Amino acid sequence: MALLSLQGVTKSFGGLTAVKNLTFDVEAGAIISLIGPNGAGKSTVFNLITGIYMPSSGSIVFDEHAIEGLKPHSVAARGILRTFQNIRLFSHMTVLENVLVGRHARMRSAAWDCAFRTPFAQKEERSSDAAAMELLEWIGLSRFATEWARNLPYGMQRRLEIARALASEPKLLLLDEPAAGTNPAEKIGLMKLVQSIRDRGVTVLLIEHDMKLVMGISDYVHVLDYGEEIAHGKPDAVRHDQRVIEAYLGKGA
Ligand SMILES: Nc1ncnc2c1ncn2[C@@H]1O[C@H](COP(=O)(O)OP(=O)(O)OP(=O)(O)O)[C@@H](O)[C@H]1O
Ligand SMILES: [Mg+2]
């Protein structure tokens, strides 16, 4: 049984069909990539999975439960976390606080526990701080823990957004072009990070524009163009697919 399964998912905006009859599975423990040219529908797929959009038709099943139509916070509570194509951090919070926001989803103290700072709430707060610091250490940001998020170099902000998502202990992490706007060295670092995330036991669905970049790390690749899947397979097969080459380089390539 796949961890995530899309069956015939379609999303139309007025006359435009952004995603058309898309079907695919994500097996637990894999790195699955979604690639394709600008406007292919990749981010829309993430918005459908995470409850930002409701599919026009089709079903989305996660961990054996239908999730299409659930609100984003309910999808997150079930274990699907994401990052955005354009970084969305709490820029006026510190690096550590950003990660603690992510941890919060996993804390069990009731509101009155927090208000009265009961021993349970205090203990949970301490272990939460420790877990957040451990995560920052792991991702290479611990020396920036008390910095404001907005003061971090861009590539580090990308990492912080991933750390915040990981802090909620997701089963499935959706990364929307995590390396967008970074320099070549940072890009390689981020792709290595994606592999380490999978090695931590988190399944990854990755959107990346740069075909070369994903080929080295993906177990399986789905290629979209104008909302439709034009190819899928292991990286080597997809790389040599004529429709994929045409979609990226134009007909006659
Ligand atoms: N809320 C919306 N309303 C209308 N059209 C939308 C909406 N969201 C996306 N679209 C359209 O759907 C299509 C797919 O957009 P999407 O952002 O999913 O593409 P993408 O593959 O992520 O592209 P990019 O590589 O540029 O990020 C585009 O034509 C886009 O303009
Ligand atoms: Mg996009």
Image (cartoon, helix red, strand yellow):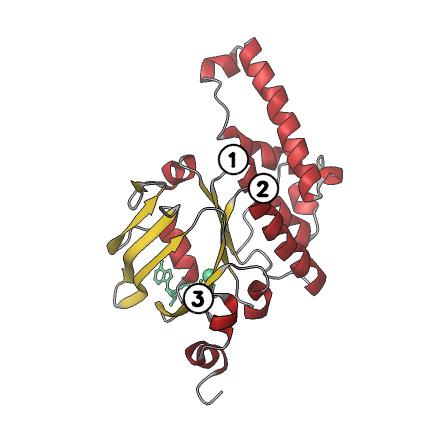
- At label 1, which amino acid type do we have? Ser
Vertical order, 13 against 116 (above or below): below
- Dot 3 corresponds to which residue? 233
Q: Residue at x 54, y 48 (%)?
A: 88
* Nearest to the observer: residue 246 or residue 120: 246
- At label 3, which amino acid type do we have? Gly
Figure quadrant, ligand 1 = bottom left
Direction from residue 192 to residue 69 in the image, left or right: left
Nearest-to-viewer mark from 1 and 3 = 3
Image quadrant where residue 131 sits: top right
Q: In the rendered structure, which disc, 1 or 3, sits on the residue that comes first in sequence?
A: 1
- Dot 2 corresponds to which residue? 200
Q: In the rendered structure, which disc, 1 or 2, sits on the residue that comes first in sequence?
A: 1
Question: Is residue 239 in view from this perspective?
Answer: yes
- Check contact, mark 1 vs mark 3: CB within 8 A: no
- Dot 1 corresponds to which residue? 168
**x then y, percent, for residue 216:** 59, 63
Vertical order, 160 against 178 (above or below): above
Question: Is residue 94 in view from this perspective?
Answer: no
Element carrying mark 2:
loop
